[in-house]
Amino acid sequence: MRAADADILIIPGWSGSEEDHWQSRWERSLKTARRVEQEDWYEPSLKTWTRRIEAAVEEAVLPVVLVAHSLGVATAVHAAATLPPGKVVGAYFVAPADVDHADKWPITRGYDPIRSLHGFSPLPTARLPFPTMLVASANDPYCSLERARQLAAGWGAEVIEAGECGHLNVSSGHGPWPEGLLRFGLFMKGLG
């Protein structure tokens, strides 16, 4: 499958993805990509965030591929059970936020992660109903590599270990992230 053959839903995490973030760049460069917008990027509510994904999937006219980062991964995993069967054909997850261990996260932009999460924990660990690739970093402050492997095993996801790449965002030097785009292209090709 080519990217043009799918509705690519970009699902950012907490605070959204700034202009230079790889997700924002992909949204601008991939013809069928669009962002799942949230009402409040800084005070996430699981119920509200998953409803936005559900609505975006229902509105899609092509097969759907989810591209989620950080807290967006947790949101997509929670939403998976409520999505129309067969409509989502794949998910590309990057740097998952381990909401079950948010007490170990650093304070980010002055926000305490425990206070700004509403209902995201516990993370579902059941097998996902679509092919999934999970890209994880060895030194991500929001999810250990060991935990990312555990989550991927439960979800039935293929794990790509990216090395020491931080949270795979602009702060860790992954604005353009060409390696990620190449890996995404290979993932898409494997979908059909």
Image (spheres, grey):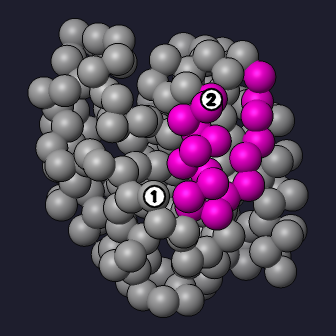
Crowd class of label 1 (few under 14; some 14 to 19; many from 20; radius 10 Å): some
Let me know if residue 1 is in the magenta part.
no
Residue plotted at (61% across, 75% down): 130
State the count of labels.
Answer: 2
Residue plotted at (33% across, 37% down): 100
Q: What secondary structure is found at the residue carrying circle 2?
A: helix
Residue 146 vs 60, above or below: the answer is above
Crowd class of label 2 (few under 14; some 14 to 19; many from 20; radius 10 Å): many
What's drawn in magenta, residue-wise?
A: 145-163
The residue singled out by tag 2 in the image is 145
The residue singled out by tag 1 in the image is 125
Residue 112 is labelled as none
- Image quadrant for the C terminus? bottom right
Residue 49 vs 12, above or below: the answer is below
* Amino acid residing under circle 1: Thr
Task: Choose the circle earlier in sequence order: 1 or 2.
Answer: 1
Q: Is residue 102 left or right of residue 7?
A: left
Counting from the top left corner in percent of width and height, residue 137 is at: 66, 27
Residue plotted at (18% across, 59% down): 48
Let me know if residue 149 is in the magenta part.
yes
- Asked if one can make out residue 24 in the rendered structure from this viewpoint, the answer is no
Q: What secondary structure is found at the residue carrying circle 1?
A: loop
* Amino acid residing under circle 2: Leu
Q: Is residue 158 left or right of residue 32?
A: right
- Image quadrant for the N terminus? bottom right
